[in-house]
Amino acid sequence: MRFPPSRKLKKQQELEKLKAAGLYGGALVQVSGSIVTRYNDCLAMLGLSPTSLERFTIDGMGWSPEIALEKDNNFYLNIGEANPNAIIITPEQNGKPVHMPFHSFDRDIMTAIFAAYPLQIRDITKDSAIVVHLDQEIDAYYEPFDLLRYKKISVHFNLLDNLDQKQAAQLELINTFETANNFIDRQLHQEILASAQAYGDLRERKLQLPSLELPIGSFYTKAFGGIFVLRDFVTDIIVFEDKALFAKAIENSSLEVNLFHISHHELTVTLVSQGIAQFDIKKAAKTDRYDRIKKHIFAEHLGPTEHPLPEILGSHLLFKKYLNTLEPDTRKKVMSVELYNQRKIIERDLKLEDVVDLQYTQALLEPHKNLEVEHQEIIWSLLAKIVPKDPLHLYWYEKEAFYNAFKTWKPDYQDWVIELILKSRD
């Protein structure tokens, strides 16, 4: 994602409220001094130009918001859409958020790396750094159906200055030195001394990072304008965010896979019919999630008010007062869930779709309780994108979509959402 230089300052200013509340750009690692040089050397390994910044911050993958602005490219660490990379220059990156993931599993991969090699990372980053290459063994994406081949990912590591190779060479020199009468070889003495002077004593260093291979199930990728790939269900499902690419894929598809655009009502019907998502309107109406969604829809229709919006949304009496200022049809839409549940007690044959607004039946969907945790996470993310009416879930599962939406909200609604998120952390 690129943006023109004229938008840089505006982009920074728009989210100041969130920054002040610790909800944007938090938990980053500060980089300065000699570590900047080391980071630039890693960029050079990736064929990228160095940053001119003397200090900046990085997330768990080594991505820097300041460098992204400088380069006008949010995905400057990627080599094409199929090959993302990461940079590890300090153990402090362990457990840090991944602020600009290209795939939904990027954070999990970094967690796996730090879990597999904690001692090696601590040792290596004392005087070196690691470039991580996430390789799904596909050189480039050519069409969306290439994503169906994406079933595992190999994680490869390259050390700055090839320090692991220098260690192997140093150990070989020492082994030669200790063999037969080679200890009297002056040339060998000089070679060992030169290696030690250049790289230090590497004999006991933990520098070996064997490649990792990790399975990939259902996932989301920003490739092709944003695509969800859902696997291990009745049929494979691909969900497109880009309408033009969806239309093209429909024309060219000969595979046994269900294709949807994210706006299609048939998508949510399929999620329910295949046991991927579930919906219980009586149960949902009693949840905090429903209350948040209802207040969001209400705020979307509310005009000028005498009271601050956070006060209205926090008061049952004020909510009712302003609800009655809405047009009758709008009021019915906002309160359609309650109206349905009340009428259903008497009208047994009442149909849900005749009363409840469609955005509620979609927004109140949730992952099926029998799904594994991995699948639940990706389905929550998909549902948050289909109908982004729950600001808290949007923040939890789709932060980039949340930040984009936040900039469009009224200032007093922004204040209410910030308070809502902060309270959820208590």
Image (cartoon, rainbow, N blue to C red):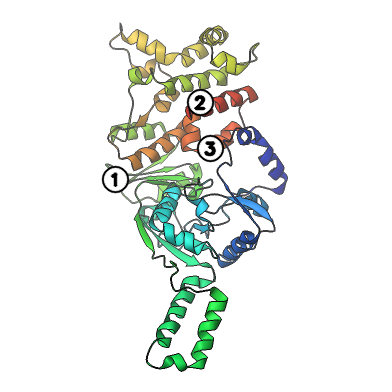
Q: Nearer the viewer, mark 2 or mark 1?
A: 2
Disc 1 to disc 3, C-alpha distance: 27 Å
Give the Cα distance between marks 3 and 2.
Answer: 21 Å
Q: Point out which mark residue 232 bears.
A: 1
- Name the amino acid, label 3: Ala
Q: Quadrant of residue 291?
A: top left
Give the vertical position of 154 relative to 380 (above or below): below
Where residue 236 sits: x, y (%)? 32, 45
Per the model, the C-alpha gap separating discs 2 and 1 is: 36 Å
Amino acid bearing label 2? Lys
Residue at image coords 60%, 25%: 415
Q: Secondary structure at mark 1?
A: loop
Disc 2 designates what residue?
A: 423
Image: 114 above or below 337: below
Pinpoint residue 295: horizontal percent, then vertical percent. 51, 19
What residue does disc 3 label? 401
Measuring from the top left, give residue 231's x and y in whole percent.
32, 46
Tell which of 115 and 40 is nearer to you: 115
> How many residues crowd around disc 3 within 10 Å: few (fewer than 14), some, or many (20 or more)?
some
Q: Nearer the viewer, residue 4 or 394?
A: 394
| Closer to the camera in the image, 349 or 373 | 373
* Residue depicted at x 47% and y 73%: 202
Q: Position of residue 136 (x, y in %)?
A: 40, 59
Q: Is residue 309 above or below residue 51?
A: above
Q: Residue at x 30, y 48 (%)?
A: 256
